[in-house]
């Protein structure tokens, strides 16, 4: 039986792997994809992670993985299909094998909800983004579009209005779902053009985003499209074990969940800010909590 299994190899999982190695725990990292990095792999330019002024997601992800491997982490390329409670811990069932462990850190991240329109997947990372605070700086002085009507969409529009030449805020309904104070700020901002009852039909461009086509038939020239129609936590395999809130695993900064021996780190857990830096912090906190749990048991 292992001391720990880390599920996922994004920033939270890889950070946890480094700390688990330093703690001399007997552990494994199980990753579904043969490439580490999680959602940051979708970004061609990252300039807000300390120590890396400009780096692409693939390079940063490989740097994280190399650090974890050098520290002594062992990686298993497999997909977790179930986690079952057993005496003294948990059985982690995968497609190829299964493992027994005293504790589990779930660092499976979240997935941005897609518009599922033509051009979206092809231009992701080349003008299509799901994080304004991550990528907005690359569109300084340029026109952009934000799609969505909740708090995040309006916050993104306000943030981008400070650095971009013009922001088109596109919402499929006739009114926003966001907090009233955000709506007031948006409607008073002269750089934000609100388009109600409108949907994006297509995102176009050769090597990068050049324009969007609306369901009205109108084509608008933009350099970036920020999609903020919600995110879905990759929490399905833990939902029956630990308490969740709006699909996210309920856990505070200690990363402890309602299930004894189960910890949640990174985008999969309830938290205010989902960034590479906060995921890395979660990895450290989660392992610290794992150590406390193992020592007390």
Image (cartoon, helix red, strand yellow):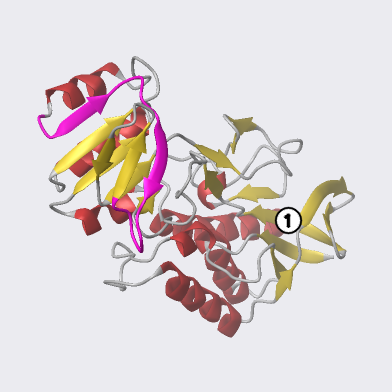
Q: Name the residue under label 1.
A: 103
The spot of residue 206 in percent (x, y) is: 35, 61
173, 272: nearer the viewer: 173
Identify the residue at horizontal 12%, vertical 29% (top origin).
189
Q: Residue reaching furthest bottom?
A: 70
User: Percent from the top left, x then y, of residue 62?
Assistant: 51, 76
* Magenta-colored stretch includes residue 204: yes
Q: In this view, does 266 lie to the left or right of 80?
A: left
Classify 10 Å Cα crowding around label 1: few (below 14), some (14-19), many (20 and above): many
Q: In which quarter of the image is the N terminus?
A: bottom right
At a point 29% along the width and 65% down the height, the residue shown is 47
Tell me where residue 88 appears, x and y as whole percent.
Answer: 85, 53
Left/right placement of residue 84 relative to residue 285 reads right
Q: Is residue 173 among the parts visible in the rendering?
A: yes
Secondary element under disc 1, as helix, strand or loop, is strand
Q: List the single residue furthest toward the front.
A: 217
Is residue 26 something that shows in the picture?
A: no
Q: Give the range drawn in magenta.
A: 190-210
Q: Is residue 199 above or below residue 64?
A: above
Examine the rendered structure and indicate whether residue 20 appears above or below residue 116.
below
Answer with left or right where residue 213 lies relative to residue 114: left
At a point 39% along the width and 35% down the height, the residue shown is: 200
């Amino acid at each position: 039986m292992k001391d720990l299994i880390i599920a996922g190899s994004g920033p939270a999982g890889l950070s946890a792997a480094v700390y688990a190695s330093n703690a001399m725990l007997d552990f494994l990292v199980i990753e579904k994809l043969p490439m580490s990095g999680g959602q940051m792999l979708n970004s061609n330019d990252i300039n807000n992670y300390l120590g890396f002024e400009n780096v692409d997601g693939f390079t940063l992800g490989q740097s994280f993985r190399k650090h974890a491997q050098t520290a002594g982490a062992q990686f298993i390329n497999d997909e977790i299909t179930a986690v079952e409670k057993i005496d003294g811990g948990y059985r982690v069932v995968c497609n190829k094998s299964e493992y027994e462990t005293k504790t589990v850190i779930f660092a499976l991240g979240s997935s941005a909800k897609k518009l599922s329109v033509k051009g979206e997947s092809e231009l992701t990372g080349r003008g299509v983004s799901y994080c304004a605070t991550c990528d907005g700086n690359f569109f300084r002085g340029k026109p952009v579009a934000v799609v969505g009507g909740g708090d995040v969409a309006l916050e993104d529009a306000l943030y981008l209005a400070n650095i971009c030449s013009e922001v088109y805020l596109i919402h499929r309904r006739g009114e926003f779902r966001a907090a009233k104070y955000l709506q007031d700020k948006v409607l008073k901002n002269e750089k934000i053009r609100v388009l109600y009852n409108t949907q994006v039909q297509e995102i176009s461009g050769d090597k990068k985003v050049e324009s969007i086509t609306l369901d009205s038939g109108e084509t608008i020239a933009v350099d970036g499209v920020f999609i903020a129609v919600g995110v879905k936590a990759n929490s399905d395999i833990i939902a029956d074990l630990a308490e969740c809130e709006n699909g996210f695993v309920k856990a505070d900064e200690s990363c402890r969940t309602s299930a004894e021996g189960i910890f949640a780190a990174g985008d999969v857990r309830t938290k205010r800010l989902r960034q590479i830096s906060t995921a890395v912090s979660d990895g450290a906190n989660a392992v610290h909590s794992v150590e406390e749990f193992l020592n007390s048991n």
